Image: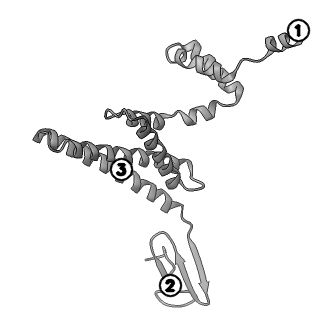
Amino acid sequence: MKPKAIAQATKPPDFKAQITALIPLARTDEKAAAQFWQILEANGTAEKFVRTEGPAEKAERSLLGAYGRTDVLGKQMDARRLAILRCDLAGPNPTPLEVLLVERIALCWYHVHLCETAVAQNAGIMSLAQAAYQDKRLNSAHKRYLSAIKALAQVRKLQLPSVQVNIGEKQVNIGEKQVNIAQVNGSPGGHPIGAGT
């Protein structure tokens, strides 16, 4: 019986329980916040925690909770839908910049649809001023969405490798903008891509 009591006395405190208890205190107390980070760093999970609790996740939670949504299952479905969208857009090996842009696209996509829903659900009861405001809000959300998509497309376009294929005296350069066939070795006017096109 004594060995069991000794084992219980020397058992290390439960990591998850410590963190869970500290979170509410750490939001308002600097000492509790410092203790919180010490525990995470000692456990090797500080970076993981930061990556899973960033501003994008807070914005997503806010959007999911916005617009009077009380349907718990509906919120969970939307959260899963956003996670799937991020995975689909990111692909297998995204760069850190792609991850940031994918997060932005997912949030903007969701916000556009929330704005569309608000317009559709209130179409018959809005005043002209309210309708104009909702339309402006929707257009603004849509512009941000398209801007994020464009930024991701540009980043990915810049990452594409250039390819050069030599076939006899002909050279085919496939670069960022166009494909040219140029004479090499003595043809007047012949030039590879980027050398005068």
The residue carrying pointer 3 sits among few (fewer than 14), some (14 to 19) or many (20 or more) residues within 10 Å by Cα, namely many
Q: In the picture, residue 67 is in which quadrant?
A: top left
* Label located before the other in sequence (1 or 2): 1
- Residue 31 in the image: x percent, y percent? 58, 12
Q: Is residue 28 above or below residue 149?
A: above
Q: Is residue 109 left or right of residue 138?
A: right
Question: Which residue is depicted at the point 58% across and 17% down?
Answer: 22
**Alpha carbons under labels 1 and 3: distance apart:** 65 Å
Q: Is residue 34 left or right of residue 187?
A: right
Q: Which mark is residue 174?
A: none
Name the amino acid, label 1. Answer: Lys
Quick one: quadrant of the C terminus? bottom left
Q: Is residue 142 above or below residue 17?
A: below
Residue 136: tell me if it is visible: no
Question: Which residue is depicted at the point 33% across and 47% down?
Answer: 113
Name the amino acid, label 3. Answer: Tyr
Name the amino acid, label 2. Answer: Ile
Write down the residue under mark 2: 181
Question: Which residue is depicted at the point 50% across and 84% down?
Answer: 181
Write down the residue under mark 1: 2
Q: Which mark is residue 145?
A: 3
Q: Of 193 and 139, which appears nearest the observer?
A: 139
The residue carrying pointer 1 sits among few (fewer than 14), some (14 to 19) or many (20 or more) residues within 10 Å by Cα, namely few
Q: Is residue 91 above or below residue 35?
A: below
**Alpha carbons under labels 1 and 2: distance apart:** 87 Å
Q: Of 48 and 188, which appears nearest the observer?
A: 48
* Label located before the other in sequence (3 or 2): 3
